[in-house]
Amino acid sequence: MNGVAFSPAALSSLIPSSSSSSLSHRKLKPKASSLHSQQAFTSDPYVLELAETLEETIPSTPSTPLPLHNLRNASSQSLLSTPWPSRRDEPFRFTDLSFIRQSRILPLSHPTPVNLLTSHLPHGVYVGPLSALSSSPLLHTVSQFLSHTLPNADLFWSINGIAAPDLTLVYVPEGCHVDSPIHLQYTPPQPTTTHASDTMHLSNPRALVVLEKGARVDIIEEFSSTPGNENECYWSNAAFEAVIGEGAKLSHSYIQTQSFRAAHIKWTSVRQESSSTYELVEVSAGGKLGRHNLHIQQLGPDTVTELSTLHLSVGDQTQDLHSTLVLDHPRGYSRQLHKCIVTHSQGQAVFDGNVKVNRYAQQTDAGQLTRSLLLEPRATVNVKPNLQIVADDVKCSHGAAISDLEESQLLYFQARGIDLKTARRVLTFAFGGEVIDKFPYSSIRDTVRSQIKTLLDPSSC
Amino acid sequence: MALSLPTHSSPTLIPLPRSPKPTFPTLRRLNYRVCVATAATPLLQVNDLRAKIVESNVEILHGVNLTVNQGEVHAVMGKNGSGKSTFAKVLVGHPDYEVTGGSVVFKGENLLEMEPEERSLAGLFMSFQSPVEIPGVSNDEFLVMAYNARRKKLGLPELGPLECFSYLMEKLQLVNMKPDFLNRNVNEGFSGGERKRNEILQLAVLGADLAILDEIDSGLDVDALRDVANAVNRILTPQNSLLMITHYRRILDLLNPTHVHVMDKGKIARTGDISMVEAIEAEGYETVSA
């Protein structure tokens, strides 16, 4: 195991010594470090310790690419001023992170295995680790695109910034259309030894996508569980950044089916130049906690943004989408469809969807719709769709609906001899199918369909 | 009478000529007269049926009595709000209504104790007046599911979508619809006429001992109405019965009811034959229900 253990001081007495001694890791004691001397305005010793553990595990070396080195420094700075989020913080009001905090965090020092299920790329396209680029001019080009901070960045963005051992770069040069999709398959950390049940391996995969003017690419990000190990406890803290150049188009598919004991926290940050298109289709069904922070910033006029997300809670789990779309330029077009299905009495879904139509974003056409299906008593959904409109010549709409399945639809099935259980299953699946149908590839649609069908009706497999 | 699937066109059926004189007694009607003589127990026996709306507690049906025998064609007419559609919905087990009294026996069994799907599988079909849209479920998927539910009930093996295809295509021709009708989502974005045709398509696929057609003629143009009526005439064999709810004479002329009932204030106020329709057309419901 090449991780370095981190356990919060307050909880260390709770961790049985037998389990900790069996681990092949080094337990850190708080000590003076450069972090401490730099900043003192965070009052959260837990975060300080965590930061220290991360820095120890993933040290910057002379071979670290400069952009990554700069990212780590900037992230360290911001991490120190950020306490661990509590339920009193608005972005985490409905999202319980305590099970992460109560775990022994073991950061992974090696990059998360990313399977690139893509071959034969056009000339000039780069897909691979940033570290493999050490001296090329591309490294210089790319470094200017790596953003260190976001206006609404949180602790987890900074953690990834410090602890991403490398980053996967996708670079598409001007005017280049990549025909086959670039499929990034992230497999969960594979512990080499058995650890105590409170141990959580932390991985911080990071991807940067740069599309030059007029480029086109489809990217599939897939976070799955290890077959046969669907109950592993780990923490994926991923970040995905994309810069879409003028007139370029990025189609982004994101599928999250991690273990039901895992924490999956992800940032997606997208910057759109003028006349560019960003399409996101997301299906998240895994994790004890699945949290997606989606931030889209418009950098020029005439952008097209289409976001379709399906969140599914079939157990004691929380699926959370926090999205912000900031429009600062004229004639942007955006559509957001968010759907949740909660089929368990302890299941929860959270949606905070913010669309800002600022002063210069005239003739914006922005639509947002969230629909939630609660299929069990006490199943919970917290939705906060919100539009902030400053411009005065815009077309904006938003809507929210939370319901059980419609009785009239159920009766229609029954009246044709189909039993209630089947009717409910088919209607529930059809509700989510609207999002699944938007995946641009039939192979992905079929895979996700069968995964969701199995989750909704475990007896079917 | 056993529940049967209309897997093949009945040999007794002859496609109706598209004649402009639909008042001819059809072959089906002639057969009916033979059948009715042999029918022993009624297909549907409704006695003093009372029902209220669950939500508002308002009683709509105040004691409906009706007997339908095998092969008979009944028409229920009546003013708006007289309880015609409520009666149909109560028969199929609509959850918005609660039966407060009376009995309904269908094929010798207590219909009111059955779930809606059991009523359907027992051979009762109702076409909805305004069928609901089912986004995300395609018409063929829905038909295959319903058809297989019926096959399962009959102890037959379920069929895959491809095996059902030719069967569905045959039924599709019956309602004069194009094949792409099957790929569309159930009732989603359908015109009024398409929705009605879709209801008849379901009847054709599933078959029924008693088909209740709730205002199948409303909102249809002349051609669509003729298509629908032709399809109904071809689907139903002399052994099947029909109960239609309508406001208009045109469909009655096409389907030739043997019994015409006028419903008023939640009861069957009067029963007669087709000649009663002329009186209604001429002088309104007041004269017949008085």
Image: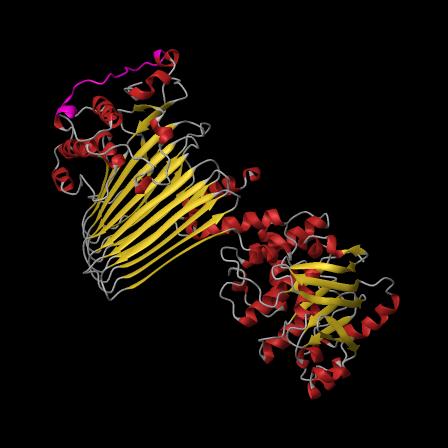
> Quick check: A277 left or right of A36?
right
The verdict on residue A33 being magenta is yes
Q: Examine the residues drawn in magenta and state their main secondary structure.
A: loop
Q: Is residue A239 above or below residue B243?
A: above
How far across and down, in percent of the image, does residue A430 sit? 50, 51
Q: Is residue A59 above or below residue B45?
A: above
How far across and down, in percent of the image, does residue B170 sit? 63, 63
Residue B130 lies in quadrant? bottom right
Residue A226 lies in quadrant? top left
Q: Quadrant of the N terminus of chain B?
A: bottom right
Q: Which residues are magenta?
A: A21-37
Residue B105 lies in quadrant? bottom right
The verdict on residue A197 being magenta is no
Q: Quadrant of the C terminus of chain B?
A: bottom right
A367 or A426: nearer the viewer: A367
How far across and down, in percent of the image, does residue B262 sit? 73, 76
Q: Is residue B237 visible?
A: no
Give the residue at x 79% y 70%: B72
Q: Is residue B222 visible?
A: yes
Total marks drawn?
A: 0
Q: How is the image coloured?
A: secondary structure
Give the residue at x 70% y 69%: B234
Q: For the view shown, which residue lies furthest in the bottom direction?
A: B282
Q: Is residue A42 above or below residue A211?
A: above
> Quick check: B48 left or right of A397?
right
B52 or B122: nearer the viewer: B52
B257 or A252: nearer the viewer: B257
How far across and down, in percent of the image, does residue B158 sit? 65, 48
